[in-house]
Image (cartoon, grey):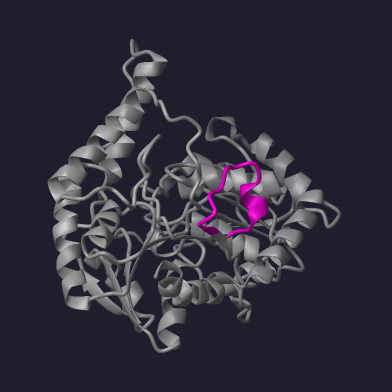
Amino acid sequence: MRYLFVSAQLAGHLDWGGYLATATALQQRGHEVTWASGPAVAPLVEATKLSFAPLAETGWRWPPPPPLTRPADLSDEAWRQVRGERALDQWLDPPRVEAAVAALHAVASDVQPDVVVSEMFVAAAGVVAERINKPLVVAGWPAVAPHSTAGDALTQMARQRLERLLATTGCGGVNFTAEGPPALRSPHLHLAYWTARWYAGLPLLPQTRCVGGLPLAELPVNPTLPASDDLPWVVITLGTTFNRDPAFFVAAAHAAHQLGCLPILLLGRTPDPAGDDRWLERLPPTAIVRDRADFRTLLPYAAAAIHHGGAGTTHALARAALPQIVVPHAADQIHQAQGLTRTGAGLHLPPKTVTVARLVEALAAILPDWSPVRAQAAVLAEEMAALGGAPAAATLLETLPRMTS
């Protein structure tokens, strides 16, 4: 079979807990798999030996515009509207998505896929799958019934954008929500790389299938780091996208240091101590700073993590059965924080509440062996492994044509 996978042009959008791994599992089973995205992620995809199709436009706005500054006289409701419009601009700007549809349709015409698989934030995938009359699968996000069908002004604006997109592309919107906030919705299959308990209380639709994730593979420990038996490791990161928050890194590092742990900071970029990263001088003397690290050499030996709640990072930590403290910084990260709260496998701290003292309190609650959070992290890892992870997702994709015929 032929599969066309689609993503935005950021490293984190390849993951979602098992997205790229699902594509490679299919290829290893003899299927033809093509990954379409912006050229920026080509090296990461090609490293897995998948065929890569560059898109001049994915529909995802990157780099983002400058940060918003709230006027002093702007009401809370007006500010929410402004921020909501900015979020819509990120993935549902009709002219940008229309350009992405043209680029992706050209790839689909060449690949002739039997199935189109997309992450949640590539609206063009829903349009192109309908145009070529092939099933769409959404990976990394469940199908959830809308809480309300009426919608506020922001929802109405968003739906108007979707209606414009569908009108100009000649589609009926079979792969989008029909009411409530607009979003990609496959009528056939949503692959969620978590467990049903992760989504407890949410109105999941029947096409959602939870596949969890297999235990994180363990590689030999990094010999350049102090032994974790002497100083328990606390991994601190903001991922690779929204990773410029010196106050977060400094506070988290000092909290770990105060509790006798080794703070290991992964900046997601090359440090610049003489420029923008002069704040590194404010770190405790024991702190270790790296640009990146292979999680397989780090997480199996760590005691806990403080991070932003990126889907891939959260998922890797959950598979390693590590208790986590999530401080969401952007976009979908609040959803990971909520999942950890539902399962009891981690703690959620809003960014505005983060201080050294608050992080010390939170770390002290999750570090001990007897911590209920640590126990729940182990339970979650077992539940995820039992569901089969990316290989199970690949099996569902193999059976999809029979399900939709």
Q: Residue 160: x, y in percent? A: 24, 33
Magenta run includes residue 103? no
Image-quadrant location for residue 377:
bottom right
Q: Residue at x 38, y 58 (%)?
A: 119
**Which residue occupies the extreme top position in the image?**
73
Q: Position of residue 108 (x, y in %)?
A: 21, 70
Residue that extends furthest to the bottom in the rendered view of this protein:
30
* Total marks placed: 0
**Residue 353 picture location, percent across and down:** 59, 31
Q: Is residue 91 left or right of residue 76?
A: left
Q: Is residue 212 visible?
A: yes
- Name the residue rendered at 73%, 39% in the picture: 361
Q: Quadrant of the C terminus?
A: bottom left
Question: In front: 198, or 174?
Answer: 174
- In which quarter of the view is residue 305 placed? bottom right
Tell which residue pokes out farthest to the right in this image.
370
Depicted 278 relative to depicted 387: above or below:
above
| Left or right: where 74 falls relative to 15 | left
Position of residue 79 in the picture relative to residue 25 (left or right): left
Q: Image height check: is 310 above or below 54?
A: above
Q: Position of residue 66 (x, y in %)?
A: 26, 37
Magenta segment boundaries in residue numbering: 194-208
The quadrant of the rendering that contains the N terminus is: bottom left
| Res 282 visible | no
Residue 157 or residue 282, whichever sits in front: 157
Prevailing secondary structure class for the magenta stretch in the rendered image: loop
Q: Name the one closer to the observer, 333 or 155.
A: 155
Give the residue displayed 60% in from the left and 68% down from the top.
213
- Residue at left offset 65%, top offset 72%: 215
